[in-house]
Image (cartoon, grey):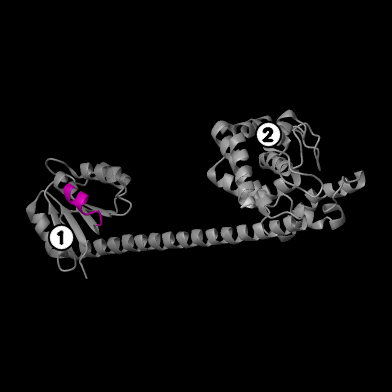
Amino acid sequence: MEKQHILIVDDEEVNRAILDVMFRSEYEILQASNGEEAIKYIEEDHDLALVLLDIVMPVMDGFGVLDYMKEHELLESTPVILITSETVRNSEDRAYAYGIADVMHKPFYPDIVKRRAKNIIELYQNKRNMEERLKEQEEAIRAQEQKIRENNEFMIDALSTVVEFRSLETGEHIKRIKYFTRVLLKYLQKYFPKYGLTQEQIGEITRAAALHDIGKIGISDAILLKPGKLTDGEFEIMKTHTTLGCDILQSFCQDQDDDFYRYCYDICRHHHERWDGGGYPDHLVGDQIPLSAQVVAIADVYDALVSKRVYKGAYANSVAYDMIISGECGQFSPDVLECFKLAKEDFFDLVEVIKMLNYL
C-alpha cells in the first residue's frame, strides 16, 4: 500500500530532520525550506495527509503558505499543524482564523507530536470518507428521484391517455399539449424574465399539463361523446371536469405541498379560466389565474381548434390562430398571448408534421 505524504516546511534543517525521523516509518516525507518551495509541493500533490508548517522563514513565511491554501480552498481537506518557537498569541489566533488544525511549540516532544499528528490525520481522513459516502448517497437519492419522476411521467401519460381514448382521441392530444406548453414556456422564459421561470419549472409544468383533462374520467359517455352541441345543462356537467380532476388528484397525491402537485392542481382546475373573468369554475381574473394554467389554456384551445372532434371538424392553422388572437375563444393573458404570436410557426409546424405522419 502506498504511503501517505506529509510535507514538512521549516527553514532549519535540523528541525526538518527531527520531524522526518518521527514520521518516515509510516509516511512518505516531503521537505521544504521556505514557503515558496512548500507551495510547489502543494501544487504537485493535492492529496497531502498533513502539512507541518513553520511560521518564520525566509523568502515566504508560513502565513504566505496559508494564504495560498485558503485561496485554493485546500484547508478544508488538508490539515495544517503550525510548528513554531513563537509564543505570540496574535500569531496563533491569526493562524487558527485560517482554519489550521493545531499549533505545536518548539522544542517539541516526539511522542506528543506523533500522537497529535496521527489523530488529526485520522480525523481528516474520516471526514473525507464521510463526505464521499454522503456524496454517494446524494447521487443514489438523485438517481432514485429521477427514476420516480420517470415512473410518474409514465403513469401520468397512461392516465391521460385513458381520458383521451374515452373521448375517441388518438392519445396524441397529450403529446401536443405538452409540446405547445413547453414552447410557450420557453418564450415566456426568454421574453418575460419577470416570471423567473427555471428549466426545472418548465419541465414540471410541461409534465403537469398532461393531466389537464383528467376529470373527464368522471363525465358520462353520453355527454363526453355527444356528436352535437351540448345543452346548457349538459355543458354545466361538462364544466365539472375541472373540479372532478382536482378531486382525483387529491385522492392519490400524498404530498400536496409538492410543487409538481400544485402545478397539476392549478392546471386541472383553472385551464378554462379567462383573463377577463369569463371562464370557469372560479371566474378568476387576470393574474389570479396561475401562470401554468394561463399557458395550458392557450395550448388546449389551439389544439382543440386544429383537431377533429366528435362535434366538429378541424380548423386550419391560420383560422385557429386568428380565432385565438381576435378573442373569439375568450380573453387570454396578454403576455402568454404575445408568446403565442412569437411561437406561431412552431405551432403550425407541429400540426403539419402530425398530419404528414398520419397520412403516411
Which picture quadrant has residue 16?
bottom left
Residue 36's place in the image compared with 15, above or below, is above
Amino acid bearing label 2: Ser
| Residue nearest the viewer, comparing 351 with 245 | 351
Q: Using the rendered image of the protein, determine whether residue 91 is visible from the camera's viewpoint.
A: no
User: Residue 17 at what x, y percent from top left?
Assistant: 9, 59
User: Residue 103 at what x, y percent from top left?
Assistant: 25, 52
| Residue nearest the viewer, comparing 293 with 176 | 176
How many C-alpha atoms fall within 10 Å of the one at disc 2: few (<14), some, or many (≥20)?
A: few
Q: Quadrant of the N terminus?
A: bottom left
Residue 211's place in the image compared with 3, above or below, is above
Q: With 43 as the anchor, is 133 left or right in this view?
A: right
Q: Which residues are magenta?
A: 40-47
Which picture quadrant has residue 342?
top right
**Count of numbered labels shown in the rendering:** 2
Foreground tag (2 vs 1): 2
Which element is circle 1 on? strand
Most common SS among magenta residues: helix
Residue 63's place in the image compared with 112, above or below, is above
Q: Check disc 1 and report the residue beneath it.
A: 29
The disc placed on residue 305 is none
Q: Check disc 2 and report the residue beneath it.
A: 318
Amino acid bearing label 1: Ile
| Residue nearest the viewer, comparing 360 with 45 | 360
Q: With 187 as the anchor, is 16 left or right in this view?
A: left
Which element is circle 2 on? helix
